[in-house]
Image (cartoon, rainbow, N blue to C red):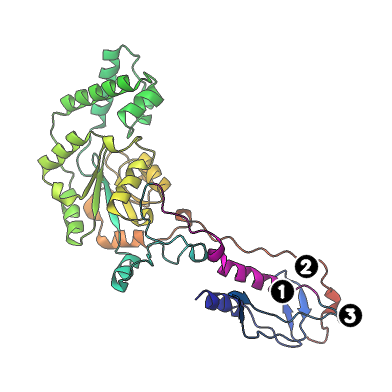
């Protein structure tokens, strides 16, 4: 197979004929006496292709840029025999593709050649193979940002700290409590103190919130549509798992989410993409085929850093402030499965490495005077 790839790559270049004026890769024109692509020879498992060299007026041979390109293609085709195939990442997550150097990146990043069932492989390559990752507050249920700020102000008063200003409270939105206390508020570095203050802040918030949750308009209908089309869904939040599971059970949508990522499962909150990447691993989806639903620019930043698409719900921010998202809606039921498939089908350059262009050195000793003036 590799031999055919290398041969096709060579035969894919523009053919050259005897006596015709052509241009090489450096843009210079020159005349070729003749050109032929003889049959390939296999000697000891090596791949050889011999090309005729152009003749100069002095009956000497000059270096050929196409000859150099043929050698590069041959070496690239056999690179996987000389380089060790990378092992699976330390976290044990299968990204869904083989990391063989000669075949990377594949035409479709969702492809998994190791699957022996062609139907399953074809299903993965379709744009319908996608996963949905939902934030909890402001996306599925109504959110009151004032309660979060009041909880932080009450905690600062209890601890005898200066109350954080408004721009600091806006900065710590979406962060874990321990992360906000240690990195932004700088109230303590002691792990025990961080846990104590984080738990106390959560207790204050739950007391202010009252344990009353109300689904946003259109959320239940949209989740039901995704369930009908068997699209896997995950729920992420920086709330404690006990609080989150209790709230999901109260509303009655716990059977819709196969994965729940809570504060105990990650080290950092937004804008770090750790929550979303971990949810994608539990769903067994590559990040490029995961769509994150959030309501803030921190979510958009975290999703894009994790190489995921993002749908922003304008619940607490106006639409124009969320322009960085891939799609902005006011309610989830404005979306359809076709919209999600169109998002998943987009292969942006920022979501994967771009193949570098092959640069050939210019042959400085080429005789430009060898151009056939009678050609025109």
Image quadrant holding the C terminus, namely: bottom right
Residue drawn at x 35%, y 51% is 93
Q: Are marks 1 and 2 in contact (CB under 8 Å)?
A: yes
Instruction: Kindly identify which residue carries mark 1.
Output: 24
Q: Nearer the viewer, residue 338 or 24?
A: 24
Residue 268 image-quadrant placement: top left
**Lower sequence index among marks 1 and 3:** 1
Q: Which mark is residue 222?
A: none
28 vs 314: above or below: below
Horizontally, residue 223 falls left or right of residue 328, namely left
Determine the residue located farthest toward the front in the rendered image.
44
86 vs 247: above or below: below
Residue drawn at x 60%, y 62% is 357
248 vs 310: above or below: above
Please say whether residue 89 is one of the residues in the magenta stretch: yes
Confirm whether residue 53 shows in the render. yes
At label 1, counting other C-alpha atoms closer than 10 Å, the crowd grade (few under 14, some 14-19, many 20 or more) is some
Q: Which residues are magenta?
A: 62-90
Instruction: Kindly identify which residue carries mark 3.
Output: 58
**Lower sequence index among marks 1 and 2:** 1
Instruction: Kindly identify which residue carries mark 2.
Output: 363
């Amino acid at each position: 197979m590799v031999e055919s790839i290398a041969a096709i790559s060579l035969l894919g270049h523009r053919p050259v004929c005897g006596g015709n004026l052509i241009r090489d890769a450096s843009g210079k024109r020159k005349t070729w006496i003749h050109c032929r692509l003889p049959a390939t020879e296999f000697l000891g498992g090596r791949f050889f292709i011999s090309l005729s060299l152009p003749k100069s007026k002095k009956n000497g041979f000059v270096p050929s840029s196409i000859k150099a390109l043929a050698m590069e293609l041959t070496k690239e085709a056999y690179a996987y025999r000389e380089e060790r195939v990378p092992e699976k990442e330390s976290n044990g997550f299968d990204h869904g593709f083989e990391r063989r150097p000669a075949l990377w990146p594949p035409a479709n990043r969702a492809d998994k050649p190791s699957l022996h069932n062609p139907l399953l492989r074809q299903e993965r390559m379709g744009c319908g193979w996608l996963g949905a990752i939902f934030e909890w507050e402001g996306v599925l249920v109504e959110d009151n940002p004032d309660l979060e700020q009041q909880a932080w102000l009450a905690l600062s008063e209890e601890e005898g700290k200066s109350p954080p200003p408004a721009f600091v409270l806006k900065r710590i939105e979406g962060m874990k409590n321990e992360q906000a206390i240690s990195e932004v508020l700088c109230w303590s570095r002691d792990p025990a103190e961080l846990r104590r203050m984080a738990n106390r802040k959560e207790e204050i918030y739950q007391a202010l919130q009252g344990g009353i949750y109300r689904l946003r308009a259109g959320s239940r209908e949209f989740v039901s549509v995704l369930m009908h089309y068997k699209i896997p869904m995950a729920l992420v939040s920086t709330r404690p798992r006990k609080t989150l599971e209790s709230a999901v059970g109260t509303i009655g949508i716990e059977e819709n989410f196969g994965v729940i990522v809570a504060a105990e499962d990650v080290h950092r909150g937004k804008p770090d993409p750790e929550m979303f990447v971990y949810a994608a691993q539990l769903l067994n989806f590559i990040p490029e085929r995961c769509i994150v639903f959030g309501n803030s620019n921190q979510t958009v930043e975290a999703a894009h850093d994790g190489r995921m698409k993002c749908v922003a719900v304008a619940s607490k921010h106006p639409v124009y402030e969320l322009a960085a998202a891939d799609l902005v809606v006011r309610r989830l039921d404005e979306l359809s499965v076709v919209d999600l498939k169109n998002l998943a089908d987009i292969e942006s350059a920022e979501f994967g490495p771009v193949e570098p262009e092959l640069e050939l050195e210019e042959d400085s000793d080429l005789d430009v005077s060898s151009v056939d003036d009678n050609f025109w």
